[in-house]
Image (tube, rainbow, N blue to C red):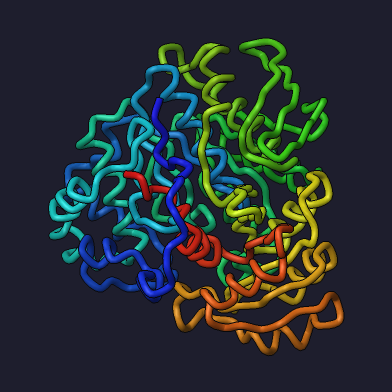
Amino acid sequence: MSHPFGRGAGQPVAPERLDRPFADPLVGRLFPPLATGVHWGLERTRDALSFLGDPHRRFPVLHVGGTNGKGSVATTLAAVLNRSGVRTGCFTSPHLCSFRERVVVGGEALAEEVLTERAAEIADAVRRFGLTFFEAVTVLGLHAFARERVDLAVAEVGLGGRLDATNVVTPLVSAVTNVAMDHAEYLGDTLPLIAREKAGIVKRGVPFVTAEPDPAIFELFRSIAGERGAPFFGVRPGDLSGIDVARDHTAFTLRTRAWGELRVRTPLVGRHQAANAALAVEILEHLPDGLRPDAEAVLTGVAQVVHPGRDQIEVIDGTTWLLDVAHNTAGVLSLVDTLDRVALPEPVVALVGVLGDKDWRVMLPPLLSRTDRAVLTQPPSAPPERRWDVEDAAGAVEHVCPLRVEEDFVAALESARKEAAGGTVVVTGSCHTVGSALKVLGREPLAAR
């Protein structure tokens, strides 16, 4: 089976050929200028979908939310279902390099011409109901899945859950990976408040599954599911055994009700990816007959998942690159755990670009304490209003490890490459940073398509 995100074997892109500021021009061709930011409410999305004939009601859906890992779970679900012969749509966000990464059908990203045609079909609805960018993207994805006649769709929540545009669906199963501090300005400044927002996707009669490791938040989810009449199921850390993290895979043993004991192997690297894969398997157990895969499809599908930028390890011209989209404290701690478990060539140099609304003061020290040197830079595709003060950040963490500031991204990447000198460059801090690095390195997910 072909993958939507091939391991692009292209050559590094010369700096003069880069499309500054690294934004995908396809977005401008698909949509007129739309409102950005967070505009709460489901009414606009529902009205637009109703105007289009409710395309989201033409196929069953699996709905996946959470602070971290929801994209890994969604793509794993799609990989297994496609392997089992279920034509599956997979809607994820944000993208790394190409907008096409967000809308995948049958394991293939939709072609630009197809997306352009589908965007034209929803243009009147987008204008009539004043959709924001993410609302328009959600409507486009759901409409495209209906037009492509998918058997089932997997939808990743964008932000929160309760008022996220994807929450217009009534799924077969809903899931929340975990809860950590992120987007506190929108979701609340405590874990229980954030958990309640994410649990907004829980619906009466729909099985709800979580891999939340914190016992108190896990029990809060159980309570919310009970209040709403949703059958509750959980994946606990003790349910996984024999976890093995290597440079090219993560393996673990999981006991299931449907398939007995499974030795699961995912190419996604990191202990946290074991929890993500186990959650995906648990979700699949709750599918009805006719959609539930067999054990062979589960094991083979999980082993074939491709989700770039998640502890992705590449060796290019003698330098090892580890690219991870960790953009909050919990994500950085998972990345640090991987660095502690996987032997990488030294020296280790961090190339870090964080958005200004993230808690970089907490994020940076654990990461930089594991590196020999660091280069702090500006994610070039980040919106101007979300750019961080790199000099301020450098002053706050310069005591942790030797570092330098290079705001120009291409120059920063080249500096990190030279300082690693055949060792390892860890690229992290945001999807913008990792996506831009993949472009410079010639490893764009859809470069060969």
Give x and y (percent) for residue 209.
Answer: 61, 34
- Look at the image and tell me in which quarter the N terminus lies: top left
- Look at the image and tell me in which quarter the C terminus lies: top left
* 385 relative position to 168: left or right: right
Give x and y (percent) for residue 398.
Answer: 81, 83
Q: Nearer the viewer, residue 225 or 117?
A: 117
* 204 relative position to 220: left or right: left
Q: What is the total number of numbered labels drawn onto the structure image? A: 0
Tell me the quarter of the picture where residue 373 sits: bottom right
Residue depicted at x 83% and y 62%: 370
Q: Nearer the viewer, residue 426 or 306?
A: 426
Q: Nearer the viewer, residue 16 or 445?
A: 16
Considering only vertical position in the picture, is 153 above or below 34?
A: above
Residue depicted at x 44% and y 69%: 38
Residue depicted at x 33% and y 42%: 109
* 262 relative position to 310: left or right: right
Tell me the quarter of the picture where residue 133 sits: bottom left
Q: Nearer the viewer, residue 237 or 173?
A: 237
| Visible residue check, residue 196 | no
Considering only vertical position in the picture, is 39 above or below 344?
A: below
Residue depicted at x 63% and y 66%: 429
Considering only vertical position in the picture, is 205 above or below 36?
A: above
Give x and y (percent) for residue 350.
Answer: 71, 67
Considering only vertical position in the picture, is 313 above or below 18?
A: above
